[in-house]
Amino acid sequence: MLEKHHLWLLLVVIFAVSACSKKVYRPASQTERRSQTTAPDYDKLEFWAAHPDKKDNADRTPGNLFEDNQSTAAVDVFYIYPTIYTGKKGQDQWNAPVDDPEFNKSVDETAILNQASIFNGAGKIYAPRYRQAHLHAYFSKDREASKEAFALAYEDVRSAFEYYLEHYNNGRPFIIASHSQGTTHAGPLMREFLDGKPLGKQLVAAYVVGIEVPADYFDEIKPCLGPEDTGCFCSWRTWQRDYLPRNHKKGNNYVVTNPLNWTIETTYASADLNQGGVLYNFKKGVKKKLVDAQVHDGVLWVKKPKFFGSMFIKMKNYHVGDYNLFYVNVRNNAILRAKKFLEQQKSE
């Protein structure tokens, strides 16, 4: 899970994947717990942070190095963004407002730009705005309020996915992609709609990143064991080498995919395999050989990346860089899995 706010602030700024660099305002515990914000209407494009029918930051590529293939893609991507909502002064809601221009801008300029854009080479990207739970919901002692906040967020994600299926999918293969709180919701969504269900046959692959996923979390959807596997899921949480999360349970059964060799084996993958990560300036493109990677006891270990400003990084939790550290590798792998899935469809 995330470290305390002041410890990961600098890394958030450097990797530019989250808007949580601003001060966190805790929601009030004794106020009305269900959000009073507007429920998203997914019939309107304004309630999609990314959508094939609108121009958005998921259409961009770092340094304009790659092609946005959404216009011709035969595959879709349903992306669920991480926790951006930290509240603001005078705001006591447990769930994010989806009609707040300032909040939506934070989502679009961080998660959509730096994470959702990874997948525009593989498919058409659908990223719903949702009343996500406040960051504090992960840490609050008011478990009932936290539970309700996450339930409301999932209600929106579920509604968006149903709308996507009814109006856009038309039997097309799709990728599920998520990070952090997005994965908190992607797991239950996959269980409800895909695991052991007919719809599961349309799953190209799932990248459910940033939250631990046990190997037996799904009944039939298995961990991906190689770079060309389909109908499976990949997951990882990134930490500095030789460091383990607080309250770490040795011998856990969490799935950890190495995004440099796309196996769950503990084989070391050198930085030479890193095709490029994205740092603080999206326009500048990618930095090759940014980090190495190795699976170790439920987490992904990497050596501290070296770049201008990295000497100031003291924290060991690279949660906010889970995707950015391996941007090009994930992009190319999504393209590969989509290609293999389509080839399998043709041969059947």
Image: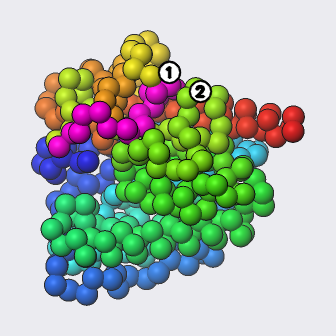
Q: Residue at x 37, y 51 (%)?
A: 180
Question: Tag 2: residue type?
Answer: Pro
Q: Residue at x 13, y 32 (%)?
A: 314
Left or right of 285: which side holds 231?
Answer: right
Q: Which picture quadrant has residue 41?
A: bottom right
Q: How many marks?
A: 2
The relative height of residue 252 versus residue 141 in the rendered view (above or below) is above
Q: How is the image coloured?
A: rainbow
Q: Is 252 within the magenta?
A: yes
Q: Residue at x 41, y 46 (%)?
A: 213
Q: Residue at x 66, y 48 (%)?
A: 203
The relative height of residue 236 versus residue 147 in the rendered view (above or below) is above
Quadrant where the C terminus is found in the figure: top right
Instruction: Find out whether the residues at labels 1 and 2 contact each other: C-beta distance under 8 Å.
Output: yes
Say which element carries label 1: loop
Q: Is 149 within the magenta?
A: no
The relative height of residue 51 versus residue 218 in the rendered view (above or below) is below
Indicate the position of residue 61 as horizontal and vertical percent values: 54, 38
Indicate the position of residue 21 as horizontal and vertical percent values: 23, 52
Q: Which picture quadrant has residue 52?
A: bottom right
Residue highlighted by disc 1: 261
The relative height of residue 87 versus residue 182 in the rendered view (above or below) is below
Indicate the position of residue 55 as horizontal and vertical percent values: 60, 56
Q: CA distance from mark 1 to mark 2?
A: 7 Å
**What is the magenta segment's predominant secondary structure?**
loop
Q: Is residue 338 visible?
A: yes
Q: Is residue 54 visible?
A: no
Say which of 319 and 263 sits in front. Answer: 263
Question: Tag 1: residue type?
Answer: Asn
User: What stretch of residues is rendered in magenta?
Assistant: 247-264
Residue highlighted by disc 2: 227
